Image (spheres, rainbow, N blue to C red):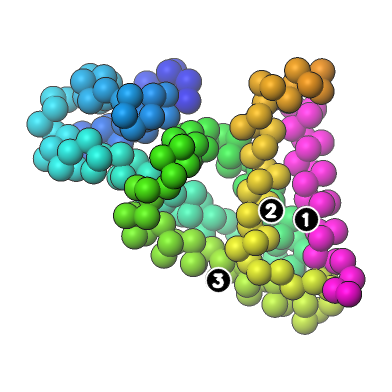
Amino acid sequence: MESTTIDREIDSALGVQERLLVAGTAEFVRHGFQGASISTIVSAARCNVRMVYHYFGNKLGLYRACIARVYQHLRDAEAQAEFWNAPPRDAIAELVRFTFDYMLEHPEFQGMMRVENMADGQHVREVSDVNDRASSLFGRMNTVLDQGVRTGDFNRRPDAGALYLSILGLCTIHIANRHTMQVVMGRDLASPEFLTARREEIVGIILASLQQDPA
């Protein structure tokens, strides 16, 4: 997350708790849980260290709250999206585009996931809302997939979680591996031309996977 974006978000936050979450997320993304500095976090949040313990108990409590926050923002945005009632093919296509754009515009999500995966996911297991919110997403996806099978739009009915994993992977690999792959490919993976073409290519891949012959 770029420092200018962090500063702007912190400046616009209304309360100390939210400022700590924004500053904490930025620090954890940069340095991981072990390397993150509470003094740096409270300085960026413009408060004192007592506020960390008041709101979150300790550094680990703040870290887990930051994980919950990035998941909550994603799930809230998904739930508020207007494409869920569209025809099945359109709904899945728009889910792909939404996910692609969200991951590009919210690097803090991938950053926190990278840090937590390096810790073998030991802390995310303690964040109860993560599974609950994912269940809501998969429920909406299941409704769309079932409708698509009934209408003949889809020949294949995958597990919603497995399909989302494919969407998420395709929508993030060019970000997670941008610096190495743009050397290998000899092109700028952050250019608007590449991103526009890549997004539509992923839409085509996912829709084609749902139209495969079940045999």
* Spot occupied by residue 124 in the image (x, y as percentages of width and height): 38, 50
Indicate whether residue 4 is drawn in magenta.
no
Q: Magenta residues: mostly which secondary structure?
A: helix
Q: Is residue 157 left or right of residue 116?
A: right
Q: Quick one: label 2 or label 1, which is nearer the N terminus? A: 2
Indicate whether residue 211 is drawn in magenta.
yes
At x 33%, y 32%, the residue is: 33
Q: In 3D space, how far apart are the residues under numbered discs 3 and 2 (Cα atoms)?
A: 17 Å
Picture quarter with the C terminus: bottom right
Residue on which the image places disc 2? 166
At x 28%, y 32%, the residue is: 19
Q: In 3D space, how far apart are the residues under numbered discs 2 and 1 (Cα atoms)?
A: 8 Å
Q: Are marks 2 and 1 in contact (CB under 8 Å)?
A: yes
Mark 3: give few (<14), some (14-19) or many (20+) Cα within 10 Å: some
At x 41%, y 40%, the residue is: 119
Instruction: Judge depth for marks 3 and 2 and give the one in front.
Output: 2
Q: Is residue 139 left or right of residue 71?
A: right
Quarter holding residue 179: top right
Please tell me whether residue 4 is drawn above or below residue 145 in the rendered image: above
Amino acid found under the numbered disc labelled 2: Ser
Q: Which residues are magenta?
A: 189-215
At x 49%, y 36%, the residue is: 114
Residue on which the image places disc 3? 139
